[in-house]
Image: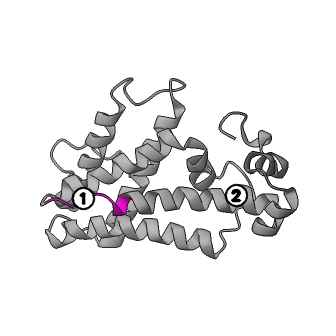
Amino acid sequence: MAEGGPGAFSVRAVADEVGTSTRAVYSLFGSKEGLLVDALAQGAFEFLADNIAELVESDDPVADLVAVGGVFRRLVLEHPVLYRIAFQRILAGLRAGPEVTAARERAFAALNAKVRRLERADLLGDTSLPDATIAFNAMLEGLANAELRGPTLRILPADDEERAWREALTTVVAGFAAGPPPEGGNRPGAIPASPSE
């Protein structure tokens, strides 16, 4: 798939690559869709869960959470097809069976544990733990999509993407601690709301 796109994938190609029969592949995965979509999506989530779990914790929960961005970016750079299958749904047919769901939940729990350290350090302000985890995850996915554009419609600075990820994620975390703007007003330096908002 990485070499020829989604259309290049077939059960026969997989069987030939690993030196087995198509019958054996179907027996293990059930169908092309089961192999192509579920198993590969599961691999993406397992990559995230395993690599986030391997991050060494420091005394700085902000730096440790921002380091999760490095794991997410590695998935995008090293396994872009897996990322696209799991997060961008480039192929129809994801059944999200129990194995895929369990892998996704494990990856999200690993992220949530890093955000929980901010909560324990009183760095979430009025932002709830679930809201902070969702917001941070949304920024990860947004940065990943921007990275995958490459030079086409580029928004990340060329040859400085890693710094852009780090600064964007650090800004999100700083926003948690800052809390919402005063009622009816804006934080200093914020873009004012339009009259219709």
Identify the residue at horizontal 36%, vertical 59% (top origin): 52
Residue 191 shows in the view: no
Front residue (pair 195, 131)? 131
Q: Position of residue 146 (x, y in %)?
A: 47, 37
Residue at x 31% of width, y 70% of height: 113
Instruction: Give the main secondary structure, helix, strand or loop, of the magenta stretch.
Output: loop
Q: Nearer the viewer, residue 170 or 107?
A: 107
Mark 1, residue position? 56
Q: Which residue is mark 2?
A: 37
User: Residue type at mark 1?
Assistant: Val
Q: Residues within 10 Å of mark 2 (few under 14, many from 20)?
A: many
The residue shown at (77%, 50%) is 19
Left/right placement of residue 140 relative to residue 92 reads left
Q: Is residue 168 visible?
A: yes
Q: Position of residue 60 (x, y in %)?
A: 14, 57
Assign a secondary structure to mark 2: helix
Residue 78 lies, in percent from the top left, at 50, 41
Q: State which quarter of the image contains the N terminus.
A: top right
User: Residue 5: x percent and y percent?
Assistant: 71, 37
Left or right side of 162 for 85:
right
Identity of the residue furthest to the front in this view: 19
Task: Specify start and end residues of the magenta stretch as a single range.
Answer: 52-58
Sooner in the amino-acid sequence: mark 1 or mark 2: 2
- Label 1: few (<14), some or many (≥20) within 10 Å? few
Determine the secondary structure under disc 1. loop
